[in-house]
Image: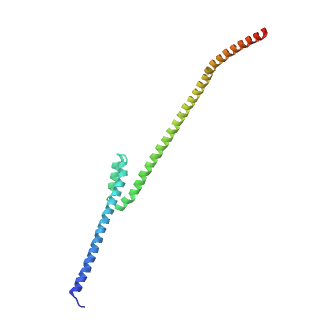
Amino acid sequence: MTCTIEKILTDAKTLLERLKEHDTAAESLIDQSAVLHQRVAAMREAGAAPAEKGSAAAAPAAASRRARSAPADGADGSRLRPHMLLCQENTQIRDLRQENRALWISLEEHQDALELIMSKYRKQMLQLLQGRKGEDAEPVLKVHQANSVEIEGQIDRICEMGEVM
């Protein structure tokens, strides 16, 4: 086993190349961990945002619960968080359903009122049209009667002329 300077230099070069590869791999791992850290922070903020949307009275209680559960164990907090989010979503769904029921009741009341208004409108329009028929028929009848009297007069004249002839 002879150690030559050339062999030492080639080994040093290969070691240097390996160190560079390891350095780039470490840098990429650092970048990936920073990205993951940002995603975790965003998830924590997103999880905290629905809790902040609740009422002002519920916020201090939730904060004290978080403070009590935080020192205990990180895993317990991660198990409680989905449960808390589901409870919040359930209350929101319940509120939305109740609001939906109230809106349906209001819609039905409005439809009933509109139906009543339309029936009264139709009734008044029918009465108005029937009243107009009587009013419209009166002048026409008068004209017809005047025409028939005039025609009768002319028929009588024609008859008299016929007798005279």
The residue shown at (64%, 17%) is: 143
Residue 157 versus residue 113: which sits nearer the camera? 157
The residue shown at (62%, 18%) is: 139
Location of residue 6 in the rendering, given as x and y in whole percent from the top left corner: 22, 86
Q: Which quadrant of the figure has residue 73? A: bottom left
Query: Which residue extends farthest bottom?
Result: 1
Location of residue 37 in the rendering, given as x and y in whole percent from the top left corner: 32, 62
Q: Which quadrant of the figure has residue 142? A: top right
Q: Is residue 53 left or right of 114 when viewed as pictured?
A: left
Colour scheme shown: rainbow
The image quadrant where one finds the C terminus is: top right
Label total for image: 0
Location of residue 152 in the rendering, given as x and y in whole percent from the top left corner: 72, 13
The image quadrant where one finds the N terminus is: bottom left
Query: Which residue extends farthest front?
Result: 165
Q: Is residue 58 left or right of 118 when viewed as pictured?
A: left
The residue shown at (45%, 49%) is: 93
Location of residue 161 in the rendering, given as x and y in whole percent from the top left corner: 75, 10
Residue 154 versus residue 33: which sits nearer the camera? 154
150 above or below 56?
above
Query: Which residue extends farthest top?
Result: 164
The residue shown at (58%, 30%) is: 122
Q: Which quadrant of the figure has residue 3? A: bottom left
Q: Is residue 149 left or right of 1 when viewed as pictured?
A: right
87 above or below 133?
below
Residue 104 versus residue 119: which sits nearer the camera? 119
